[in-house]
Image: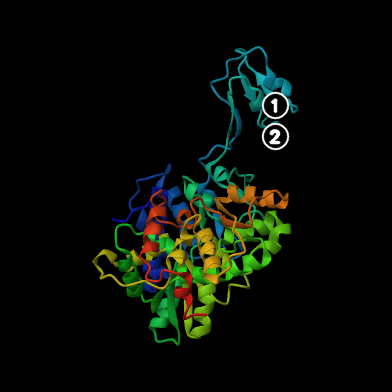
Amino acid sequence: MRKFDTKVQHLKYKVLREVARQAWRDTLLDNVLDIPKTIIPGNTPTMRCCVYKERAILADRVKLAMGGDKDNHNVIEVIETACDECPMGGYEVTNACRGCLAHRCEDVCKRGAITFDSNHVAHIDKAKCVDCGACAKVCPFTAIVNRKRPCQNACKVKAISMNENKAAKIDNDKCIACGACVYQCPFGAIMDESYILDVIDVIKKSNRNEKFKVYALVAPSVSSQFTYAKLGQVISGLKELGFFTVIEAALGADMVAHAESKELAEKGFLTSSCCPAFVDFVHKNFPELVPFVSHNLSPMATIAKYIKETDETSKIVFIGPCTAKKAEIQKESVKPYVDVVMTFEELQALFDSKDIDITTLPEDVLDNASYFGRIFARSGGLSDAVAQGLKEHGISDFELKAVPCDGIEACKIALLKKSKGVLDGNFIEGMACIGGCIGGAGCLTHGAKDKSEVDKYGMEAYEKTISDAISMYI
């Protein structure tokens, strides 16, 4: 049975599935306006005040499923029509206020934003309040709290504010496309653009005997997804969709670990380059540390580059948990190698759009990478792989002091320490998502067990060392 963490994910999936279904049949443009009615038949609303508003929001979801706003270079977009149920947020007085006589909150407020009613209970004038938080700090009852919207709480780079219509607004100069807001928004008002139509288009062209082959490049975090089926059946399902073959992105991780460990020993200090959201965060917030970012491409781009150089007829579709990968392939350094990116959510929709029940398929084999390449999917895996790379290079005079960063807040702390010259470490493993790639916004499920699934998948690798895995490729 298909499993999604939330009903928002399930709704997003239904839209993607229907858009894909019509695209396979070449009937999308004829039926695009009817898709909301297909998903919500009848006149009974299921989530909103009226069915017409629900369908209006679904129409916006359909646009995002078809590629979104072409004038917006960010892959994360806000559906304003869906973003109207959350309170504005900010500092509020709760019923814990005892109407005390001290009035410390009033005394400390420099804006005169706090007044009292006849019962001495405090009230905050939102027109005057600047959300400094001084009142909350001095309240002896902790009766003043800062209520933020879920998207603002989720966004650790402070890229989300509210516009004049009280809808979420994304600052593209701060956003790193990690997708945390996408997963946490309880109304599905923030979504990542989908390029599922591009995937379908490239497969259909290859099936019409065009002179190219479509490779599915699968992230190692696939081991924690599609838990209702076996991994080998997922691989068979991809070939059933029309992919020429399936390659592990973990092989690219082996290549990166091999090169990055040597680069680290030569330079003495590095930050990783595997997570595009982390790299973007460094560029936007710590530009002075950009020279320390590893010169290696990400595992996705590294193996895609090899495939493109080996097979000139290849088209590469990366499939993983990451919304930031959709932004990464827009970079000039990556654009020549990866043609399209889609998430595991989108892959599920693609399977079902063609009525492919992967549980009925035979198990195919996926065995390109080593244990160390596969564990890149979870926090700490890259550090372990770099340690192994140093060992396999025979570099014994360099002591690795890795700093694995589990989430963007941990990344910020490590980078700040490095910028101040107080970091006790020589390698920052930057992962924007909690848990690493297994916590990516495009996952089907997000769970604590995912780490053990990744390690188990790694142990199943035929190649036990990085050198063995990449021996025929370098």
Q: Is the residue marked by circle 2 packed among few (<14), some (14-19), or many (20+) residues within 10 Å?
A: some
Q: Height in image: 9 above or below 314?
A: above
C-alpha span from label 1 to label 2: 9 Å
Residue at image coords 39%, 48%? 7
User: Toward the viewer: 91 or 216?
Assistant: 216
Q: Position of residue 37 (x, y in %)?
A: 37, 56
In the picture provided, is 374 more to the left or to the right than 142? left
Residue located beneath label 2 in the image? 130
User: Toward the viewer: 325 or 309?
Assistant: 309
Quick one: SS at disc 1?
loop
Amino acid type, mark 2? Val
Residue at image coords 45%, 69%? 465
Q: Are marks 1 and 2 in contact (CB under 8 Å)?
A: yes
Q: Height in image: 163 above or below 432?
A: above
Residue located beneath label 1 in the image? 113
Q: Position of residue 472 (x, y in %)?
A: 46, 81
